[in-house]
Amino acid sequence: MTLVEAAKRLSLPQGTLKNWVYTDKRGELTTVGKHQKPLFELELELSRVKRELAEVKMERDFIKNV
């Protein structure tokens, strides 16, 4: 199976799959994602940003009405 066929079957961009294959050939696939924040931390950050955005929108709307 070609890289293009595999990417289509997996619904992945070809570049992503190509990078994974290249990383695996170098023996570094187990280190992929080691430096990313855990999902829980990302969810907390997303909640914080959503709250901040809501607050900024309220402030903007208040200033528009003054």
Image (cartoon, rainbow, N blue to C red):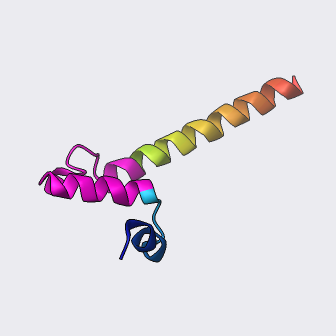
x, y percent for residue 2: 38, 71
Quadrant in the picture for the C terminus: top right
Nearer to the camera, 58 or 24: 24
Name the outermost residue toward the right. 65
Q: Main secondary structure of the magenta part?
A: helix
Quadrant in which residue 35 is drawn: top left
Nearer to the camera, 40 or 20: 20
Q: Residue at x 40, y 73 (%)?
A: 6
Q: Where 51 falls versus 20 (above or below)? A: above
Q: Residue at x 16, y 51 (%)?
A: 31
x, y percent for residue 54: 64, 41
x, y percent for residue 28: 14, 51
Q: Where 58 falls versus 24 (above or below)? A: above
Q: Residue at x 14, y 51 (%)?
A: 26
Q: Is residue 62 left or right of 11 when viewed as pictured?
A: right
Name the outermost residue toward the left. 27
Q: How many labels were placed on the picture? A: 0
Quadrant in the picture for the N terminus: bottom left
Q: Is residue 55 left or right of 23 when viewed as pictured?
A: right
Q: Where 46 falls versus 52 (above or below)? A: below
Name the outermost residue toward the front. 2
Region in magenta: 15-43
Nearer to the camera, 10 or 62: 10
Residue 26 part of the magenta segment: yes
Q: Is residue 2 left or right of 34 when viewed as pictured?
A: right
Q: Where 47 falls versus 14 (above or below)? A: above
Q: Is residue 34 left or right of 19 when viewed as pictured?
A: left
x, y percent for residue 25: 17, 56
Residue 24 part of the magenta segment: yes
Q: Residue at x 28, y 52 (%)?
A: 38
